[in-house]
Each structure stands twice: as C-alpha cells, then as structure tokens.
Image (cartoon, rainbow, N blue to C red):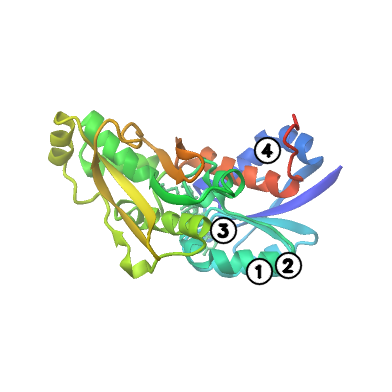
Amino acid sequence: MRVIKAALLGFGTVGQGVYEAVRTHREQLKEKLHAEVEIAAVLIKNPRKKRNIDSSVLVTTDFREVLAIPGLEVVFEAIIGEEPGFSYCLQAIEKGCHVITANKVMFARYGNVLLEKAKEKGVFVGYEATTAGGIPVIRTISQQLQVNDIQRVQAILNGTSNFVLSAMREKHLPFEEALEIARQHGYAEADPGNDVKGQDAFCKLMILSRLVFGTQPDWEKVEVEGIGGLSLADIERADRQGLRYKHIADIYRDGGTLKASVKPVLVPPEHALYAVEGVNNAITIYGSLIGKITLTGPGAGKFPTASAMIEDFAAGYRPVPQLDAVS
Ligand SMILES: NC(=O)C1=CN([C@@H]2O[C@H](COP(=O)(O)OP(=O)(O)OC[C@H]3O[C@@H](n4cnc5c(N)ncnc54)[C@H](OP(=O)(O)O)[C@@H]3O)[C@@H](O)[C@H]2O)C=CC1
Ligand SMILES: N[C@@H](CC=O)C(=O)O
C-alpha cells in the first residue's frame, strides 16, 4: 500500500492530537485514502522535554532536516506565532508539500500569500483548524455557501473566553481560577493574554473575512476588547436580569467598507449565541439564499482541533465526492 509521509511542526496540545489521531484512525484513513499515513518527523523547540514519540520518528529542532526527508508530502503546522510558522509553511509549499495549519496568528496575516503560492505549486493548504476548533466553518462557507451572498458573520470564536464566562456564571468562579482550568484543558494559547484580550478571536475573524468577503478590514480600525474588564459581579448581575455576556466577533459590509468588532456583548435568551456555553464556539452566518444559520461545536482542545486538521488532510487527498456518494 502507498505510504503518505507527513511531518508535524509542534508537539503541544494540537500536535499531539494529530499524532494520536493518525494512530487511532489509521484504518479509517486507509479505507478513505487507500494509503498508510506515516508521521516521519516531529519538529519541536525544546529538545530536553520528554515526549511519547515512536523511536522511528525523527524528532528535531532543525526544520531543514524535516524538509530534507525524501518523499515528504504533507506538513502539519501547529507552532506558535507568525514566525517561524510562516517561513516554514512557505518553504514546505515551495518544496511541493501540502500544508495544513492550525496557526491562526500566522494565517490571519499570511493566509493569502500561502494560498497563492500553493496554487502556483499545485498543492493544497488546509486551514480549518485555525478558526473555531473542530467546527467545519471554513469548508461550510467555501463549499456549501459558494453562491449565497454572505452579508454578515457574528460569532463566538474563542473557546477559552467562552469557557471562562460560563464558569464564572455557572460556578461563580473568579476569573483567574476559570482561566487556569481552561489552560489545564489545553484550550488557552501559550500566552492566554491572546485569548482574554480578544486577539485570538480577532485573528479568526480576519481569516473568515478573507474567506467571506475576499478582503480584510483595516486591522487598526477593528474594535478589539477582551473579557478581562468583566467582573464576577457584572456577570452575576446580568444573569439575574436574564442576560448573558458573550464575547462576540462581528463583521458585515456597510456600503463599500467592512465594519468589524470583537468585544463582550450582553445578549438576551432569543439571541442565537446566548446558549453557547463552555469551550464551544458558534458562528451565525447570514446568507442571501439560506437566511440565518448557526454552526456550533467545540472551539478548542486537542481532539476537536486534530479533527479539523485530519479532515483537511483527507479532503485534500480525496477527489471531491459526488452528491450521491455513500463512502
Ligand atoms: N490549543 C488549541 O485548542 C488550539 C490551538 N491552535 C493553534 O495551534 C498552534 C499550537 O497550539 P498548541 O498545541 O495549543 O500550543 P502548545 O503551546 O501546546 O504547543 C506548541 C508546540 O509548538 C512548538 N514550538 C513552538 N515554537 C516553536 C518553534 N519556533 N520551532 C519549533 N517548535 C516550536 C512547541 O515546542 P516544545 O514542545 O519544544 O515547547 C510545542 O510543541 C497555535 O498556533 C495555536 O494558536 C488552534 C486551534 C486550537
Ligand atoms: N486558544 C484558542 C484555541 C483555539 O483556537 C481558544 O481558546 O479558542
């Protein structure tokens, strides 16, 4: 059977999720792709950390060793920040590898460059995992809403912030304690400031903006506010009034310009995002034909994110299924 050689960049929450998913779903991958998937290399930063990685896998801190692997076809990128993530993805594409990334900070800024380069090189770039964890929002928009004119997207895009708000309201936990639990679950970023100050949701909104509207608003003009200004008393008072604070990313066209904001909003029970709790994310899309739909599901964490990456991988390798295909 043919072997698809892949490399993993990063072996944290997401990288380990992909590594384990390739093992636990080996049979499903074989059946769908008619190929074995081999993780041939794992790139990490700290060579002294103990890791549970098979001894046949190259574990290295040197990306050149990864790229030098003969027959390498796919790079899963799950490291932190714009660089070196962007340079690594670009080099992988230039070498003719498919790239699947979870790195939204990098992709919000450089997504276009990578997608253009991938087109030129005849490879694919999967970025489902960058936005809303396991929810297939990128594929839903790009494949199932191609004809609809999308007028607006309103979403909860940060699992950590939503988890913290829920834990404060439901369990009356102080902010710091709720955030620490989110961190222990692997939901939070390496720097959780990016979650609770709104930057993570901002990056995801910019990725959606490019996909939906073909462009992004001026980053400087987007109002970005995190949940840090909300006290337990604020949240409990809202609850007594039958309202909930939700951290909402919103984008819509206003004449010729895109208006976007990322901030806590007080919502009533009839709002589509009111009942979204814990680590879940949700995306409400307003389309010209479909009307209003809301996609909901886990927005962060090891396996939901790995699911998005593995599904990108499978979708990239499989021909587009016919409408009546059953397998
Ligand atoms: N956690 C989540 O639920 C989600 C995370 N993401 C994104 O996925 C990416 C990874 O997140 P997560 O797994 O949580 O992060 P972690 O902090 O758990 O892991 C990061 C991994 O990247 C490695 N790394 C960091 N910098 C470098 C570098 N310069 N060179 C090589 N390796 C490097 C680290 O190496 P070492 O182990 O040696 O420290 C570590 O293995 C991030 O971009 C994040 O925004 C996306 C969706 C969900
Ligand atoms: N830190 C992020 C992880 C997923 O993108 C979040 O909490 O949503």
Kind of residue at disc 4: Arg
The quadrant the N terminus occupies is: top right
Mark 3: few, some, or many residues within 10 Å (few <14, many ≥20)?
Answer: many
Is the CB of mark 3 within 8 Å of ligand 1? Answer: yes
Residue position marked by numbered label 4 in the rendering? 23
Q: Which mark is residue 121?
A: 2
Q: Quadrant of residue 223?
A: bottom left
Q: Which mark is residue 12?
A: none
**Which type of secondary structure does the marked residue at label 4 adopt?**
helix
Residue plotted at (49% across, 44% down): 133
Residue 89 in view, yes or no: no
User: Of callouts 4 and 3, which one flags the residue occurring earlier in the amino acid sequence?
Assistant: 4
Kind of residue at disc 1: Lys
Looking at the rendered image, the disc whose residue lies closer to the viewer, 3 or 2, is 2
Kind of residue at disc 3: Ile
Residue plotted at (29% across, 55% down): 197
Q: Which mark is residue 117?
A: 1
Callout 2–callout 1 Cβ contact below 8 Å: yes
